[in-house]
Amino acid sequence: MRFVDEFRDAEIGSAVARDILGVVETGRHYKLMEVCGGHTHSIYKYGIDDLLPANVELVHGPGCPVCVIPMGRVDDAIAVAARPEVVFTCFGDMLRVPGADGTLLDAKARGADVRMVYSPLDALRIAREHPDREVVFLAIGFETTAPSTALTLKRAKAEGLRNFSCLCNHVLIVPPLRALLDSPDLRLDGFIGPGHVATVVGARPFEFIPREYGKPIVVSGFEPLDLLQSVHQVLTQLRDGRCVVENQYARVVPYDGNPRALEVMAEVFELRPHFEWRGLGFISQSALRISDAFRDLDAEVRFDVPGVRVADPKACQCGEVLKGVIKPWECKVFGTACTPDHAIGTCMVSPEGACAAYYNYGRFAREREVV
């Protein structure tokens, strides 16, 4: 990839859209799930769905790491941040995620020392600069960001930093996909696979989808032509009666993943027996915790974390959006009581959230006549 413009060529996009029209069956409705929130934003930023036939529907999956964090885990973070000896650090998109006791920004307004960082290494630097304070990093994300957290913990241990710890909320991509496929209320024809996660885990972990559930999946990049080509590949598989994993994002994603990243994750983390997902409930072995070898850097061990499960607000339908059951604009509070400035749910907060994508790009309604 030399230039971004190569992947945003409108003339080529129109040609691919015509090819897509040629592989769909008239009278059949196709429902494809883009797993990653980054894909959702690209689809609506560039108007990809407007180039698709009306009988090809894209629905959104649980691939936004901020969106799937339950309110109880946010409250755990706020409880740690409120301690007077703590400097609490996190990525910017976590600052406005609502818990039962407000947000981390609210905690900051009440006097907590909450700081935004761009990397866990920024949090490590703060710990070096303030040896008299306890510096906690709120780690979130799928396998995409877990290696950077793991390497930071290894460095902290090597340096003997006693005032640094991590509140780990890393989650895994395969278990929620399996949970969705086992759900009786969702019917899908295929998947647009998450390119960012696949740069670490590769495309091979998704082989269970065609093997066990008979659904095609194409791991996709994030530019407009990436997504159009991926949709074309999924629909072509359906036309031809094939069902395999295809790697459209081969320029970035090795089929077997990044062995060094997987190795450091295995060294620093271990599977949690269960973890709560917003909208999906508890899923076994779907998240990571810090291993015993790095136990002294685990904020859940170092501090008294409430660990209380908190129900989502009744008005919020983030769970249904994350499962692809409804579109964001079908939520009762979308664009009215729930906006990016005053969010009720996580899907409106995160820059990868489906509700934020619909709101930011003016998708307040989608009424398309299926042909």
Image (cartoon, helix red, strand yellow):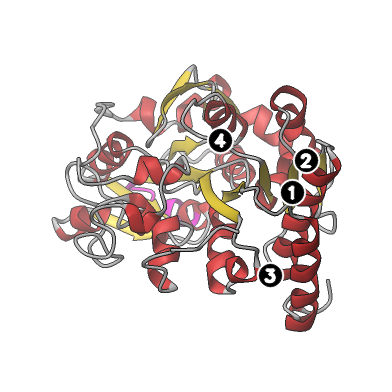
Query: Which amino acid does the dot numbered 1 rest on?
Result: Val
Is residue 125 in sight in this rendering? Answer: yes
Q: Residues within 10 Å of mark 2 (few under 14, many from 20)?
A: many
- Select label 3 or label 4 by which is in front: 4
- Between the C-alphas of marks 4 and 1, the distance is 20 Å
Disc with the residue nearer the chain's start (1 vs 3): 1
Q: Quadrant of the C terminus?
A: bottom right
Percent across and percent down for residue 14 are: 75, 77
Q: Which is more foreground, mark 3 or mark 2?
A: 3
Which residue has dot 4 on it?
187
- Which numbered marker is on residue 219? 1
Image: magenta residue range = 125-134
Q: Secondary structure at mark 3?
A: helix
Badge 4 amino acid: Arg
- Report helix, strand or loop for mark 1: strand
Q: Are marks 1 and 2 in contact (CB under 8 Å)?
A: yes
| Residue that label 3 marks | 224
Q: CA distance from mark 3 to mark 4?
A: 25 Å
Q: Which residue is mark 2?
A: 203
Query: What amino acid type is highlighted by mark number 3?
Result: Pro
- Give the x, y percent position of residue 190: 68, 42
Q: Earlier in the sequence, mark 2 or mark 4?
A: 4
